Amino acid sequence: MAVQQQFKDRIKELKERYDSLKTGKDALLRLLDEAEVAESVYNSNAIENSTLTLQETERILLELAVVREVSAREIFEAKNLARVVAYMREKAKATDIGKDVILFLHKMLITAIRDEIAGRFRTTGEYVRVGTHIAPAPEHVERMVEAAVTEYNSDNQSYFLERIARFHLEFEIVHPFNDGNGRIGRALINWQLIRLGFSPIIIRNKEKSGYYDSFSAYREKKNLKPMAKIIALGLLESLHKRVTYLEGTPIITLSEFAKGHDKTASSLTNAARRQTIPAFREKGVWKIGTSPRSQ
């Protein structure tokens, strides 16, 4: 069992609360989604070694000037990924993932950055390496992607987060594109979550060491647990945030909460990282609602 039962139980309970609270509050949920775009874009690009800060990403997406000189590539990376995020949040509810969706998202992401490879898989002579991992030869790429899609869409037995984790790991092992594999792969996680009625997650740059380690665990031992846990924790945090806003309870920083409850900030931060308290991050700052559930 890749996802512990305690995670499954908490996700089930939060999803039920989320579904019961969201009726008639589409405008609020849209605002929350829109407010997360820059943070999502910043983190996914930073994992791929973009030098943009969150503040610079926000300014670029608002068409405002950035103080320092920034490369055209990094500007397009931010704007294009924001387009992918926006498109995904509009279309994913009604569309299963498939080869055409994957290629379209890649074209959207890479256009104006490397037009010659945008929207197509690697072809003859195009090999890629990630660390010590050499991706499969290009002549196998399309077949392997289609096999991963088929397995994901036809698996009616596995827990949904295990299906998503397995697909993400297999997709990144194939590394079907010359560029943009990680960002498309993380976008597809959210496509799958939204398609299943859940909220999107953010895999954060500060936690990329564990994220990268999860690929090694899968390649070496077919261990799904590390990636499944990363996605499960991200989903719990996303649901905690939306439930807190939907309930309309006052929101304060975790450090403020600690002062009023005779607890140390470090102990609460550790609990937040484990998602054993209903805390969530906004622009990297841990926050929590002041409802009795948070006590």
Image: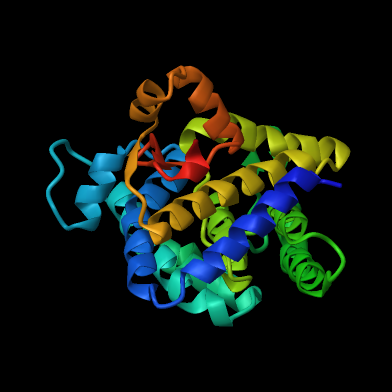
Q: Which residue is pictured at 57% across the width and 29% down the height?
A: 271
Residue 31 percent location from the top left of the image: 32, 64
Task: Please give the name of the residue rendered at 45% of the width and 57% of the height, measured from the top-left corner.
Answer: 242
Residue 265 drawn at (x, y percent): 44, 20
Q: How is the image coloured?
A: rainbow
Residue sitting at 36 percent across and 57 percent down?
248
Nearer to us in this view, 263 or 116 = 263
Q: Against 27, is 212 above or below?
A: above
Image x and y of residue 102, in percent: 58, 70
Q: Is residue 232 visible?
A: yes
Say whether residue 65 is left or right of residue 181: left
Total labels drawn: 0
Q: Quadrant of residue 52?
A: top left
Foreground residue among 147 and 178: 147
Residue 214 lies in what quarter of the image? top right
Residue drawn at x 80%, y 47% as measured from the top left:
5
Asked if one can make out residue 188 in the rendered structure from this viewpoint, the answer is: no
Q: Looking at the image, is 97 positioned above or below residue 277?
A: below
Q: Would you place residue 93 above or below residue 213 in this image?
A: below
Q: Residue furthest front?
A: 292
Q: Position of residue 59 (x, y in %)?
A: 19, 49
Q: Where on the picture, by quarter, is residue 261?
A: top left
